[in-house]
Amino acid sequence: MGLRMDEASFLQAFGLDGLEHIAAGIAVAALAALAGGLFKAGQLFGRRERDGEQFELRMNLKQAREKLEASESAARENERQINRMTSSLEETRRRAAADGDALLRIHDAIEHGFDRDLGETPAWRSQASRMPIIVIGNLKGGVGKTTLTANLGAYFGDQRFRRGRDGKPTLFIDFDFQGSMSSILLSAGRNFESGAMIQNENRASLLFQPGLEGAEALTLGRETPREHLEGGQFFDASVDLASHEERLFYDWVFDPGRGGDARLRLGSVLYSPEVQDRFGAVVIDLPPRTTLFAYNALCAATHVVVPTRDDRLSTQAARTFVQFLELGRQGFWPRLTIAGLVGLNTAQQPQQAEQVDRALEQTARDISQLWMGPQPDIPYCGKIAWMRQIAETAGEDFAYFNEVGQVVAGSPHQVFTELGDNISRNIGLI
């Protein structure tokens, strides 16, 4: 048989069924290819979908981590704030407790004045003063306290007739915020024709520095400028003394242990050997009220002189002052002696002089009933009648140095000398 086959033989050989099988095979192959493509496409799509999901998951995880970190940071900050608030609350509670204690102390100080019990007292409290420390006081203004203090100090410190211990000079201290005695001491014996004025430096406040020693105090006072008062010193005052006293009071109330008892600072200076050796007498002008500085002066004082006018209001104020002295006598000034009652600016007419003396002597007897101190009977030391020569020197000089006499009352020098002699006898100097 030959190799060539015609069409008919071919068709006959394979028949129609063969074509169908071929077509079916081709279809199957096509379907297989399509299925493979679809499978591959499906795999690719699946991978991409999974990659997208993983990316989204990673982004969600990142965001969740960032939120967690932010939450943790906020929690830490909240914890810090809570700690700060807790610490602040504790500090507020501590301060409230401290302020509450301070307010109670302030209330107590205002309610009871300065008469709370003294704590541990310094050694000078048991020491006897070698010089008279004389306080001039009354709880009413305008009764002549400044006039008496200045001229009594001049009487003790006059170089020609010094009556102080061993003829030593006088120390003047002004605790009256008006500063009237300071004006006398700043002006006395000076020539002001040039118009120059002496500046008030409020040196009385310097005496209350914590731990101030006597030697240092002597460097802080002013020298008395008046002739015949050489060697004396004075500590001047002004209205600023009130604010200084207020600051000292609150320092003492809020921190009572700082600088010792604020009521005893002046005594630490006045009883120091340097001051005791330097002066023959100390005279202190008090304000017409019971201040912290008044307590200092009275705690340190050896004697009190009570000036008054011969009118009902002034004598009643003198009575109230003696009552105050008696209330504090045992706790604060047990050694204090009332050296006498003095009438100032009394009636000048001779026909009234005897009547004024009788009235003031009766006042001295009346207030003696209130006082139970070492010298229970308060003596009447005499009076200084109103004199033009005294009035004209007020605030400018010591009337004591005016020796020009008047027809009836004599000279200011004479009347203050007689008064000073009476007080000196009462305190044992003559």
Image (spheres, grey):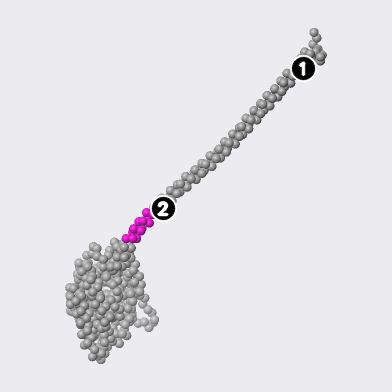
Query: What kind of secondary structure does the magenta stretch mostly adopt?
Result: helix
Q: Secondary structure at mark 1?
A: helix
Q: Is residue 332 magenta?
A: no
Residue identifier under label 2: 85
The answer to which image quadrant residue 174 occupies is bottom left
The answer to which image quadrant residue 132 occupies is bottom left
Who's the residue at 26% across and 79% down the image?
A: 316
Residue identifier under label 1: 16
Q: CA distance from mark 2 to mark 1?
A: 100 Å
**For the C terminus, which image quadrant?**
bottom left
Who's the residue at 29% across and 62% down the image?
A: 256
Who's the residue at 23% across and 71% down the image?
A: 327
Q: Nearer the viewer, residue 224 or 149?
A: 149
- In this picture, which residue range is highlighted in magenta? 87-101
Q: Position of residue 216 (x, y in %)?
A: 29, 68
Q: Nearer the viewer, residue 258 or 14?
A: 14
Q: Position of residue 320 (x, y in %)?
A: 25, 76
Q: Secondary structure at mark 2?
A: helix
Q: Position of residue 224 (x, y in %)?
A: 30, 77
Who's the residue at 19% across and 73% down the image?
A: 373
The three-letter amino acid code for the residue at tag 1 is: Leu
Q: Is residue 89 magenta?
A: yes
The three-letter amino acid code for the residue at tag 2 is: Met
Residue projecting furthest to the top: 1
Q: Nearer the viewer, residue 230 or 16?
A: 16
Instruction: Judge whether residue 194 can be spotted in this image.
Output: yes
Left or right: where does residue 361 sit relative to residue 10? left
Q: Position of residue 302 (x, y in %)?
A: 21, 73
**For the N terminus, which image quadrant?**
top right
Q: Nearer the viewer, residue 28 or 116?
A: 28
Left or right: where does residue 126 sit relative to residue 202? left
The answer to which image quadrant residue 8 occupies is top right
